Image (cartoon, grey):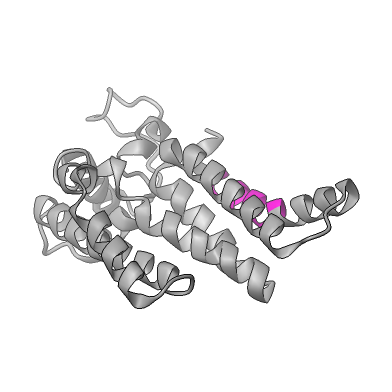
Amino acid sequence: FSIPDYFRKLFYETGNLIPNFAFNLGNGQNIFYYSYYGLLNPIILISYFLPFIEMIDYIQISLIIIVFISCILLYKWLLNKYNSSIAFFSTIVYLTITPVLFHSHRHIMFINYMPFLILSLIGVDKYFMENKRCLLIISVFLLIMTSYFFSVGSIFVITVYGLYNFIKNNKNINFKLFARETVKFLIPIIVGILMGMIIILP
């Protein structure tokens, strides 16, 4: 929590989301080295509007909220595919598995991107069922801004899930159709990645 707390204090002092110089972090090295620890992380940025809450308290509260939001989104996603009993049981399993419980208070960067990953999977469904790209673009962007490190594996998961949906929805597949639809599907993902270049490129 100390690094996000320093980012917030630096923002209050300078008014810059991306400070030119942060003396207390590596004696002023490239600020983008700390993207993994909260620079421009949407979850951390919300705390900038809450100066009356200590960062250590904010982190704890936000992680509890993140876990429950992940559960709600997972339930909603599964409910569109299975009955309510399966969706509910699967959500309870997710809520009680060791990695989620352990990392929610030890290694928060390992799970704080999960709501956006699940939202991306919902975005894939919307893309194939309603031809809507907006949710997928925004989810991939927020996924990268939250954790560019875990976004690589997450984008792989999104792509595989998209491939699964394509195969499921098309009985007669040829190379031309596959190539065309793959490019169309990858465009919103690439747009989300390009939007996240603000932390990836530096």
Q: Quadrant of residue 110?
A: top left
Q: Nearer the viewer, residue 137 or 2?
A: 137
| Side of 53 where 178 appears, left or right | right
Q: Nearer the viewer, residue 106 or 18?
A: 106
Q: Quadrant of the N terminus?
A: top left
Measuring from the top left, give residue 30's x and y in whole percent.
Answer: 41, 28
- Work out which residue is located at the far right of the displayed protein and give it: 176
Measuring from the top left, give residue 97's x and y in whole percent.
Answer: 21, 48
| Side of 49 where 60 appears, left or right | left
| Side of 172 where 110 appears, left or right | left
Labels in figure, total? 0
Which residue is depicted at the point 38% across and 50% down?
A: 17
In the rendered view, would you say 156 is above or below 47?
above
Measuring from the top left, give residue 158's x and y in whole percent.
Answer: 55, 50
Which residue is depicted at the point 75% across and 51% down?
A: 182
Q: Quadrant of residue 20?
A: top left
Which residue is depicted at the point 16% across and 48% down?
A: 101
* Residue 189 falls within the magenta-colored stretch: yes
Does the magenta stretch mainly form a helix, a strand or a loop?
helix
| Side of 100 where 76 appears, left or right | right
Q: Is residue 16 visible?
A: no
In the rendered view, would you say 160 is above or below 23?
below
Identify the magenta region: 186-197
Q: Is residue 113 visible?
A: yes
In the rendered view, would you say 160 is above or below 125?
above
Which residue is depicted at the point 29% across and 70% down?
A: 88
Measuring from the top left, give residue 138's x and y in whole percent.
Answer: 53, 62
* Residue 161 falls within the magenta-colored stretch: no
